[in-house]
Image: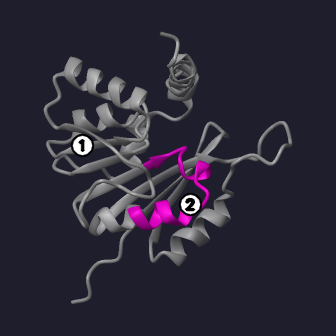
Amino acid sequence: MNNHQPERAGLERLESQERLNGMPPEKLLSVAGLGNDDDILDIGAGGGYFTFSAAERTKGRVYAVDSSPYMLDVLRGRAKESAKTNVEVAEGTAEHLPLKDGVVDLAIASLLLHILSAPQLGIKEMLRVLRPGGRGLIVEWLHPRPDGKPGHRIPLETMRLYLEACGAHIVSVDFWADTFYSIVFRTPLPAS
């Protein structure tokens, strides 16, 4: 019965009031340029930190993808409770997204890429599922781990290099509560 205790505690931390104050999903979605007809992908959606805010703001589809059975159950339950008919929950990973090429207008990876062994694979997948001219939003930790240990962190300049190497065009960089940075990027438009 306590099989999901660590995941439940992790979800509470991810959705803490402190995090909501420091990294408000509505403001980040505005910075990313969420439109009212956009199709959205929330990668590593957890309990739906961005999913349900996005579903409130768009008439388009909101795909909530996670690899954890516990988080998928939470997402499905919350989608049912919210009666949001535009939320679609799917199992997948950042490196293997369960979507076809070019199907979303905005892809979000929040506090996720740093846990991948090869963050570039996650970025390439984001670019793959985005429509031409689509936008991506990446949120990551701004500073190294406070305990000085080599933790999973991707410095801002390294993230810029990863994005540029994958062909993304950086639109904006913002800082949140002196703890996180966000990068909005755009996929290349087709040559005319």
The magenta segment: 109-125
Label 2: state its secondary structure. Answer: helix
Q: Quadrant of the C terminus?
A: bottom left
| Point 84% across, 43% down: residue | 149
Colour setup of the view:
one colour
Residue 43 visible in this rendered orientation of the protein: yes
The correct choice, above or below, for 52 with respect to 155 in the image is above
What residue sits right under mark 1 in the picture?
62
Earlier sequence position, callout 1 versus callout 2: 1
- Which one is in front, 154 or 90? 90
Secondary structure under tag 1 reads strand
Query: Residue 95 occupies which quadrant of the picture?
Result: bottom left
Q: Quadrant of residue 74?
A: top left
Q: Which residue is mark 2?
A: 119
Residue plotted at (40% across, 50% down): 108
Instruction: Give the amino acid type for the residue marked by disc 1 in the picture.
Output: Val
Residue 187 in the image: state x and y as whole percent: 36, 71
Q: Nearer the viewer, residue 146 or 67?
A: 67
- Residue 91, image x, y percentages: 33, 42
- Side of 127 where 183 appears, left or right: right
Q: Quadrant of residue 76?
A: top left
In magenta stretch: residue 147: no
Q: Residue at x 77, y 42 (%)?
A: 145
